Image: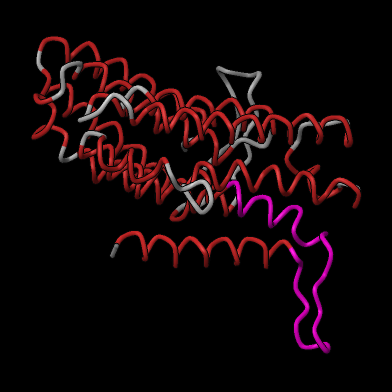
Amino acid sequence: MANVEMIMLLLIGFGILAYVVGKFNPKAGSIVVIVGSFLSFVLLAYYGYVTETLDDATNVLTFTTYKVTQLGLFFAVIVTFVFSMVSFFNPFYIEKIQYNAAYSMLYLFALAGTVGVFFTNNMLYLFFFFEFVVWTSLFLIPMGKSKKAPVWYFGFSAFGSFSLLVAVLIVRNVTGTLNIESLSTMSSGYIVTVLLLLAVAALSKLGAFPFHIWLPKVLKNSPDPISAVFSGGLEKLGAFVAVLGLVKLGSNSAIFSLNGYINMPLANYFIAILGSMTIVFGTLMAIR
């Protein structure tokens, strides 16, 4: 039986191993990355969906807490699959990167952080893992074609991280706990504020309108495998935070009703409108 903590420590261990091996043989280090990322995907998919015995117990890092949910498992399996598939291109690209050993290590560290985001049940640890992914991916971007792209990424990520931190502090002050489940018990006076803060954090990481400016710059200038990981994997962190906010808070927000035929929380419309604007604006920019 596997547990979330074991998979995360496995990725950290493989990341360190990839760094050591990559110092002597970059391609061998990239093979370690393939094994580590693919193994994490297999463990999550098998124990999460086939045997349904994925455990959230903590045996080593006892100060952390996790909870296996269908939402978190769904996102974790998708992102680990993307990372594992993209990792097969690393051996063909690794020698073009100056700091190839560090690249291999940070690649797996970023994946470990995403797993933590999807399974933690603590708001503060959600912020910590969110930041861990931001910083590991931040140092992967300048290994590509431009040193300016990370500046844009850092700026928008910092704005999103600040919004997430403020949301964490409000939740702790109002509910007296940092458990993510406490979002469902928030008083109505704070729901809109926390939901907006989570939306800003999510949209900043997702690269959705109006926080889309960093995304094309990063995808254009990052190493090719990292561009694929961003577009297919790391952006899902933003989507996860958005869905988490809608699930926990959206149902408690004000209801929009039209002649009794439409009865949905206003938060759903807010996200839908921003999503629609992102699709239209992104399409227009692409064909410009």
Image coordinates of residue 183 in percent, x first then y, are: 78, 45
Q: Nearer the viewer, residue 179 or 161?
A: 161
Image coordinates of residue 223 in percent, x first then y, are: 22, 34
Q: What residue is shown at x 28% (from left), y 37% (from top)?
A: 226
Q: Nearer the viewer, residue 21 or 244?
A: 244
Q: Quadrant of residue 168?
A: top right
Say which quadrant the C terminus sits in.
bottom left
- Is 21 situated above or below 154? above
Q: What residue is shown at x 34% (from left), y 28% (from top)?
A: 108
- Is 256 situated above or below 116? below
Q: Nearer the viewer, residue 6 or 131?
A: 131
Would residue 238 appear left or right of 126 to someone viewing this image? left
Q: Which residues are magenta?
A: 241-266
Would residue 224 appear left or right of 196 to someone viewing this image? left
- 276 falls in the magenta region: no
Q: Residue furthest front?
A: 288
Q: What residue is shown at x 20% (from left), y 16% (from top)?
A: 99
- 260 falls in the magenta region: yes
Q: What residue is shown at x 73% (from left), y 49% (from top)?
A: 195
Q: Quadrant of residue 80?
A: top left
Would residue 178 appear left or right of 242 to someone viewing this image? right
Image coordinates of residue 225 in percent, x first then y, are: 22, 39
